[in-house]
Image (spheres, helix red, strand yellow):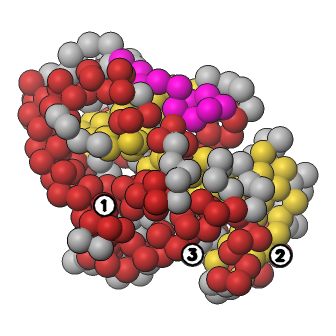
Amino acid sequence: MVSVAVLGASGGIGQPLSLLLKLNTNVTKLHLYDIVNVPGVAADISHVATNSEVKSFLGAKQLADAVTGIDLAIIPAGVPRKPGMTRDDLFKINADIVKTLIEALAEYSPRAFIAVISNPVNSTVPIAAEVLKAKGVFDPRRLFGVTTLDVVRASRFVRDLRSNVDAASLRVPVVGGHSGTTIVPLLSLASSPVELSESEIKELTNRIQFGGDEVVKAKDGAGSATLSMAYAGARFADSLIRAIKGESVVEPTFIALAADPAGAEEIRKLGAGDLDFFAVPVELSDKGVARIVPLGAEPSEFEREAISVAAEALSANITTGVNFVKGA
């Protein structure tokens, strides 16, 4: 079975994510870590009638114990986005948090799978990679940026336009990154063909790219997308858990392309160029990324143009993360 740590378990994403993981019957140990309130969260969740053991870890002095001996670390720690705040604004606050957590993982569970939710993912995943490299334990197959919310939104928003579509089973590949125009839904390559007009595709793409803004505005300063992100995080975590147990699972995720250099060539030719990180569909195994899954067909001209736009913005985001660790 599988031991999981949620780092940032008492926050708006961390609490519902921890609850959903308590319901996952493949989880045997659930470690909940945060700097505030986590004993109460753990006590509450521990009453849910599943077999996993829940433990709380409070504050920096207990971080090492929280991450020792785990198979999977999920990191939603950090502050949420507020109205008018970009993911770049978030970077200043969340970068240090992520760096500290990754340093602990590198020291005490260097072989754990690491799934980063903390925004801006386009920069926090490169931060994680640089920290792991500095510690001599970087395996690009085991580090993931969680972009599943973009995939979830794509399926749901298509359903909003076409009521005959089953949002639960529709899979839309989403490539690029995890903010604004770096998010590129490949609607033309959906698992089931969906007839959309050119104007619908443009509007739908924009809505998927900026879906988070809908939630921030609707919550009117009270937070960002926490419940849907917890659902998406739990779905991706379940895919990783199933992979750890030996299943072959396919999910889009933001990875270091060094995880599969040969497989990365297709996406590079489509516009990713020489970027070191990109969200792509991957096949997961007990080693992490087994391979980048070929798209199977050429994206549309509109989608290829969007990939080029995404790549330009991603380059700056990735550099920001790398430079943060290197002190540039």
Image quadrant where one finds the C terminus: bottom left
The reply to whether the magenta stretch includes residue 292 is yes
Q: Are marks 1 and 2 in contact (CB under 8 Å)?
A: no
Q: Which residue is mark 2?
A: 43
Residue plotted at (30% across, 61% down): 322
- Asked whether residue 264 appears in the rendered view, the answer is yes
Pinpoint residue 78: horizontal percent, then vertical percent. 47, 74
Vertical placement of residue 322 versus 196, above or below: below
Vertical placement of residue 303 versus 256, above or below: above
Vertical placement of residue 142 versus 67, above or below: above
Residue plotted at (46% across, 54% down): 133
Q: Which residue is mark 1?
A: 322
Instruction: Single out the mark in the foreground, 3 or 1.
Output: 1
Dot 2 amino acid type = Ala
Dot 1 amino acid type = Val
Pinpoint residue 272: horizontal percent, then vertical percent. 20, 35
Category of crowding for the residue at label 1, using alpha-carbon neighbours closer than 10 angstroms: few (below 14), some (14–19), many (at least 20): many
Vertical placement of residue 101 versus 304, above or below: below
Q: Which residue is mark 3?
A: 11
Secondary structure beneath dot 3 equals loop
